[in-house]
Image: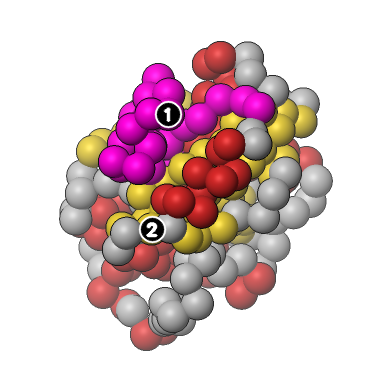
Amino acid sequence: MPCLLIIDASSSLCSVAINQGGETVWLTEDQPRRHAQRLLPMIDELLVDAGVQRSQIDGIAFGRGPGSFTGIRIATAVAQGLSLGLDRPVAGISSLESVALAVMKETGSERVLAVMDAHMGEVFWGCFTRDGNVCRVLTEERVGSPEECLKDIETFDGVLAGDGLKLMPFIECSQDFAMVRPEAKAMSAIALEYWNQQSFGDPIDHSPVYLRQSVAWKKLSEQPSLLKR
């Protein structure tokens, strides 16, 4: 069984997890605007707690978005830096998928529509269905107005989840899982599935997903400050 490191900073949460032998340990902090300062120290802390050396890591997975532009950049840069330094493959994981899977595991639901606050008066959303130990997307992940998302919700038969539901246009929707945000521990099962499917690869093939076309991504070489200790 592989030893996989999973990192996510696509929301106000900063989280890391290690999947070793199919068992997951994790560390999560609510650290808005401090992801760059906390992500690497959290990785080191979790490695020590798990008794894992960096050299023992077989692959690195990261939350590729959508979500916080800055957080996604940071997680991607850290994943790329570790990948290059350790010569290990990487895989990007959907933030919306991690929200959906977390709720599926908690409720046993087969279908989840995940909604995340995209700010600027918009939301990210996607519909997912259970697929074994993970889930798969039913409709393409989208960004748009809450009203556009509500049109999909009207015809959706399943559970709603994600912090986007706290926005006023969704006030009449179920708020039971409105506090669920992307987290590395939920991404752990997805990372293991990707590993088994041989979906890990070169960092250049695993880029952030913003859904907004106007957002620019800077290459690792253009943002060295994110990797300074």
Front residue of 197/83: it is 197
**Quarter placement of the C terminus:** bottom left
Task: Name the amino acid type tagged 1.
Answer: Cys
Taking the image as drawn, is residue 51 in sight?
no
Taking the image as drawn, is residue 221 in sight?
yes
Q: Quadrant of residue 129?
A: top right
Using residue 201 as the reference point, say whether residue 153 is left or right of it: left
Q: Quadrant of residue 70?
A: bottom left
Q: Position of residue 86 (x, y in %)?
A: 53, 61
Q: Position of residue 143 (x, y in %)?
A: 50, 60
Does the segment drawn in magenta span residue 20? no
Q: CA distance from mark 1 to mark 2?
A: 17 Å
User: Could you tell which of marks 1 and 2 lies nearer the N-terminus?
Assistant: 2
Residue where numbered disc 1 is placed: 173
Q: Position of residue 2 (x, y in %)?
A: 67, 38
Disc sitting over residue 122 in the figure: 2
Q: Secondary structure at mark 2?
A: strand
> What residue occupies the far bottom of the structure in this picture?
222
* Label 2 CA crowd tier, 10 Å (few <14, some 14–19, many 20+): some
Using residue 140 as the reference point, say whether residue 50 is left or right of it: left
**Quarter placement of the N terminus:** top right
Name which residue lies at 69% across and 49% down.
Answer: 139
Q: Nearer the viewer, mark 1 or mark 2?
A: 1
Q: Secondary structure at mark 1?
A: loop
For the record, the magenta segment spans 157-186
Q: Position of residue 108 (x, y in %)?
A: 63, 14
Name which residue lies at 25% across and 59% down.
Answer: 36
Front residue of 59/208: it is 208
Name which residue lies at 62% across and 25% down.
Answer: 158
